[in-house]
Image (tube, helix red, strand yellow):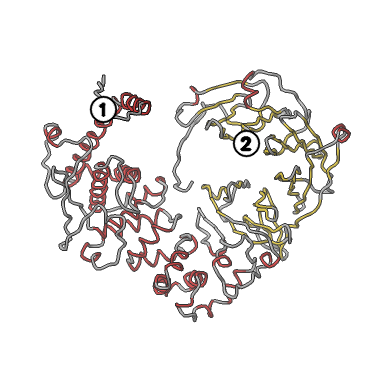
Amino acid sequence: VSDQKPLGCWSVKHGQIITCPVVCNFETHEYIAVHDDKVLRIWKNKDINLDKVFKATLSADVYRIHSLPNGGPVVLFKGGGVRTLDVLLEAPQQEIENIISDEAIKWSKAFMEGQQPVLIFATEKDGDFFVYVQKLKMNRLHKYKLEQQELSKPLSFTAYIKNQIITLLCLYSNDSVYEVLIPLQQNSEEEEEEQILSKSLILKLSVSGSVLKGTSLVVLDKDHIAILGSLAAPGEESKECLTIWNTKFQTLQTSKELPLGTSGQLWCYEEKFFFTHGKVLTVMMYKCETSSLAAAVGKLKDSQTPDVSSFVNWNTLADEELVVSFQSRQSVALKSESKMTLRSKRNTVAKVQPDTLSVGQILLNLKVNKINTSALVVSVLFSGCELCSLFFSYFYSLCPDLMAVALEKKDVHLLQICLQRFPDIPEEITYACLKVFLSISEAYLQRIDVNLESVICYIDVEFNNKEVKTEIVENGFNAELEHDIWDTKITKETHPTADGELCPVGPQKAALLNAVLQSAYSEAFLLPHLKNLPAQQAVLFLRYLYYLYVKCSEKINTALPGTRSPTISQIMDWMCLLLDAHFTVMVMLPEAKELLSNLHKFVRAQVRFYSELNKIEGSLQELQRLNHQKDSQTYSIEVLELI
């Protein structure tokens, strides 16, 4: 998700339908899917075609598969029967009992209580709701009936388990959240009869006359929950939003409007929210700390001025931002009226001297005072390393105007820092940085302060700014061997020779381009912008990528020396992306012909070299095994014949 790249894609045949969410078996690193209700498929990453992977047809319809980190996958059938995947695969056609008769399953979840898997699911029949708790190892099933709520019904469920007690949270259609406690330990008499579960009201979803019509909820910790839904104020159109509530003090902590709409589903995993916003998957980071009354009402101690935690809230993010990241360093409890508070301090913060600015004040100034952005950034850079580090440890989406002004002013040093620190830069801005870096003259860059740590270990610079040639030993490349195949004249200044190779750009420009190479991007979003790159700049960029590719191939570990240097995977990804965007232009340009020829030649030599290595891979592994078995204490000479 962080790199926005698809890692794998599998599809069923036309006419087949995947009928429950696919899960991962944590123990075997396999994927498990069910299509057409009864057909089970299991495969691994290396598998390509689902038709050729493991298949088992079951005797009953599957409702959901739950995967537990230490307990293995658990299969819940639509009739209420439960089996572990291992037991099910021993006899796929085994009979599955029908427990719930005419009831329909509405929700389910699995837990590990110690070493015991526990499954809970909720059903509905004729307006009545029931809860089942299944202990798999003990093969015990408990049935409960939810206490009825007049003129209201459950819309969504979530649950967690602690100290042998399941806490079930129910989101009802009357805009309220109720809590139900279910003990796992039951005596024999209680097991025989159906019990009525009483519920207690823990939250009313209304703030200042506005009511949240929730669709799904997740538990963040014992005092906080997140709810996705539509917030409606009297006389106003409802707006979809993600909200975080403090259940201990029954307060709305913060909310983020989602103007592009959602599917109504919300997931939570490892302190990250996952939900669809428009046509994209949005990921938001969050952090909860121990709840306190002061935090719940936005009155944390020692917060005379807006610091990072009280400033970073979703109201400061641009509405058009699709992939939003959010992280609070102190607490998820943010003052709901913080937007009004920040506006009231707009005039006073501008008067604060740069040497006394906190990170929150600087971020605030950047947001409300675009004219002085450059001056404020300078104040950050000169106010201390710790403050600078804190400032740049946040996200592009918190202050998108920062890079816009830097691009306008061609502040390449600031752009370099942003590319290195911000994980959520849009592809359009990444492309704009690339275009600026390629267009600026080398003479101008020599006067600019640029961080050279990513290039200083492999580009040696003399006073005349010419690279000092060093001997190159290219893995598997022999110029004489390839000369007969390619009738292309190689110029000494810009292409590989037996002596060495010159970098096509200066060290400053190389360092800036390296920052682009290491930024996160999605190929689908970047490619349309990359097609607009002028032909001459595209050729120059490809020449630099080719230079890096050759440099990486000099080393056994195919890695560039130094810190913040791009990896060979990043270099090759950008080469492929650039060729996809400009292949026709590259073929037509005379100055690109030689470059493509040498690139083709070098890649083919690399393929040939690794092919030869693959032939002796088995012998090398055997040699390594023999060396481990022998522990020679005396000097010896051994001759090994590779067959």
Please give the name of the residue rendered at 68% of the width and 64% of the height, measured from the top-left corner. 296
Amino acid type shown at disc 2: Leu
Residue 554 lies in quadrant: top left
**Image height of 25 relative to 506, above or below:** above
For discs 1 and 2, the disc positioned in front in the rendered view = 1
Q: Secondary structure at mark 1?
A: loop
Please give the name of the residue rendered at 57% of the width and 65% of the height, measured from the top-left corner. 309
Please give the name of the residue rendered at 68% of the width and 18% of the height, measured from the top-left corner. 94
The answer to which of marks 1 and 2 sits earlier in the sequence is 2
Residue 65 lies in quadrant: top right
Q: Which residue position holds label 2?
A: 68
Amino acid type shown at disc 1: Ser
Q: Secondary structure at mark 2?
A: strand
Which one is in front, 619 or 487?
619
Query: Badge 1 local density, few (<14 within 10 Å), some, or many (20+)?
Result: few
Q: Which residue position holds label 1?
A: 636
Q: Residue furthest front?
A: 634
Looking at the picture, how far across and down is residue 117, in whole percent? 68, 34
Which one is in front, 78 or 29?
29
